[in-house]
Image: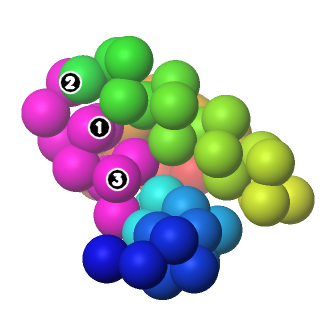
Amino acid sequence: MTHNRLSDLQDSRIVWFAVLERAYRDHDFEAIRRATRELQRLGVVVRFHALRPAGAGL
């Protein structure tokens, strides 16, 4: 892979959202931190909220 292609991937919000989603599903907290930092670097603010049980309402 060329340097430009690798750089493009590292600057892709889509790639980092995919990393974040997978890390969240796998409970990989280090990867969650890394993906969150990278998204912040790209101008995306990530916030986590506690999940509500189904039917709990708003």
Label 1–label 2 contact, CB within 8 A: yes
Q: Amino acid at mark 3?
A: Val
Q: Main secondary structure of the magenta part?
A: helix
Front: mark 3 or 2? 3
The residue carrying pointer 2 sits among few (fewer than 14), some (14 to 19) or many (20 or more) residues within 10 Å by Cα, namely few
**Farthest residue, direction right:** 43
Going from the N terminus, do you reach mark 3 or mark 2 first?
A: 3
User: Disc number at residue 19?
Assistant: 3
Mark 1 closeness class: few <14, some 14–19, many ≥20 residues within 10 Å: few
Locate the N terminus by quadrant: bottom left
Residue 43 image point, x, y percent: 86, 59
Q: In which image quadrant can residue 28 be found?
A: top left
- Judge whether residue 9 can be spotted in this image: no
Q: Is residue 17 left or right of residue 19?
A: right
Which residue is painted at 13% across and 33% down in the image?
26
Q: Which residue is mark 1?
A: 24
Magenta residues span: 18-27
Q: Which mark is residue 27?
A: 2
Measured in 3D between alpha carbons, the distance from the residue under mark 1 to the one under mark 2, in whole angstroms, is: 5 Å
